[in-house]
Amino acid sequence: MDQLPPVDPGQIELDVPRPSADPELPGPFPVGRYADKLQEEMRKRARVLLVGEVTGVGRSRVQAYFELRDGDGAVPCAIWLNDLERAGLPEGALRDGVELVIAGGPDYYPGGGAASPSFCFRATHLRLAGEGDLMLRLEALRKQLRGEGLFELQRQLRRPLLPRALGVVTAESGAARRDLVAGLQRRGWAGTVVWAFAPVQDRRAEPAITAAIQDLAARPEVEAIVVTRGGGSLADLWAFCDETLCRTVAMLRVPVVSAVGHERDSTLIDDVAAVACSTPTHAAEAAVPLDCVAARRELGRAGHSLRRAADGAVGARARHLGSLARGPARALRRERSQLNQKIREVRAATERGLNERSAFQRRIAAVVLDRVRRRAIERTAAGRAEERRRGAIIERAAARDLERRREVLRQAAVTLRAHDPERTLERGYALAEGSDGEAVTSAHAAAAAGDVRLRFADGRVGARVDAEVERDG
Amino acid sequence: MAEGEKPPSYEAAVERLEEIIDRLDSGQAGLRETLELCREGRELVGYCAGELDAVGEGLKELRLDELAARLDPDAT
């Protein structure tokens, strides 16, 4: 909206002499005329739409009046009752806390008589602000707070893993309270909850919620604050978009968990809080990040690990010491075993060496024997040749000797034949033989024998000797 | 953590306890260190158990307005 320009003094007729002691300013003017002129100037101002929250609603016989305000300021407003009726608001809709969009412009009532002058924004039309109007305001405020860095402050705070005490701002009678408690119990958390009950929907909600948050933050035992309520329209949740409330939350040194509305709802407190949750149950998990049930289980396991480690450390070392104490005997056994092993190896190696040597000797003997055999064979062959040569010589000598002997024999045979009586018989002689076949070589023997046999060359004949021996002579 | 010293927070206690168990599980700690770690670990377990007990004995619900009235009777 343009700034209201000062009333142009040139448009007001000056008919009063100016004392020389007055400042160099136009006037003085009669105030009633100035007030009329002011009203005229005001009514020339541009007509606009305003949006804000209604407070201080009142009525007179002819008009309704109220203030329209937001976090930055307020304007006194008035509307003639007939204009109000034309607006067609539901019965009772014009009340504190509602968001209105009004059309009109500035107006000034100069007063008169006993009536006091007053300034107001003269509304000629009005309607309840819709989601779109609120969203525009919300986005503008969101942009402003983000620009000031207020969204980061809470998120930088350390949130305790296991707070002993929580502060909770919510409606005393509401499902959010019940859901939050159920969520805490599901996590096994049963610490202290400091309830700060506050209205969460009307005009009184914003300061009440802000005060509750501040009071909880001032409690030393409170380690985190949960602000929660159920879902609703943006208008219902508008208290949680209040600039003062959001600035308060952003500046707190205690982490704030917001769980306002449902998942689709996005209030400004969600932006400035340390954590924004979609449900009270989720808020319980964010306010007590530690699942106490699981933590107790884990703690039991940790205790068991420590006992096992302690027992193990001592036990293992005791076993190690015992092992060390048994070390010399074990080393002796090991050495003895190694020695026995060496002996077995030596024996085996010896046997293996002997066998190898025996085999080697056998191989050598075989080679030698083979060589000897070959030499023997060679010598035998040579001997045989010699023998054959000598045999031939002997055979030749024997043949010669045999021939010689045959010759001697032939000579002897010839000689013998010469002396053979048979040859004498062949020459006509006869040989007297006794009955016993013995030769009778004398006349006496013949006479004595009586009968003799005369042997001739061609046979024998018997003969009787019957004469006496006659001597030749 | 020195003997008898209280951890600054449950988170710090749990973090230190995990470090201790990791160290013990590694098998790298000597006997003296192991016994010292076990002592510290037992203290931390005791502290954590105490913290859990403190939030495990039943939900205690207080009203801020009553607490305020107790502190400042004239305010009501």
Image (tube, coloured by chain):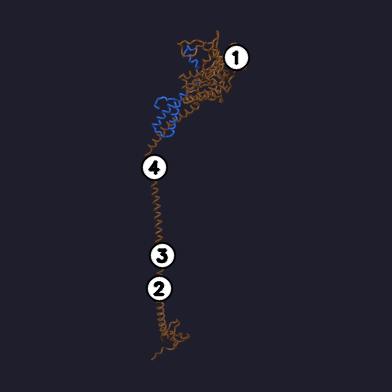
Chain colours: A brown, B blue
Q: Chain of mark 4?
A: A
CA–CA distance in space, label 1 to label 4: 116 Å
Task: Specify few, some or many for label 3: CA neighbours under 10 Å numbering under 14, 14-19, or 20 or more.
Answer: few
Q: Is residue A364 above or below residue A215?
A: below
Q: What amino acid is found at the position of numbered circle 2 in the picture?
A: Arg
Judge whether residue A287 can be spotted in this image: no
Q: What amino acid is found at the position of numbered circle 1 in the picture?
A: Trp
Question: Is disc 2 placed on a helix, strand or loop?
Answer: helix
CA–CA distance in space, label 2 to label 3: 22 Å
Q: Which residue is mark 3?
A: A374
Q: Chain of mark 3?
A: A
**Residues at marks 3 and 4, common chain?**
yes
Question: Is disc 3 placed on a helix, strand or loop?
Answer: helix
Q: Which residue is mark 2?
A: A389
Q: Quick one: label 2 or label 3, which is nearer the N terminus?
A: 3
Q: Which residue is mark 4?
A: A334
Eye-nearest disc, 2 or 3: 3
Q: Chain of mark 2?
A: A
Question: Of A25 and B56, which appears nearest the observer?
Answer: A25
Q: What label sits on residue A80 in the rendered view? A: 1
Eye-nearest disc, 1 or 4: 1
Question: Of A453 and A241, which appears nearest the observer?
Answer: A241
**Residues at marks 1 and 2, common chain?**
yes
CA–CA distance in space, label 1 to label 3: 156 Å
Q: What amino acid is found at the position of numbered circle 3 in the picture?
A: Arg
Q: Quick one: label 3 or label 4, which is nearer the N terminus?
A: 4
Question: Is disc 4 placed on a helix, strand or loop?
Answer: helix
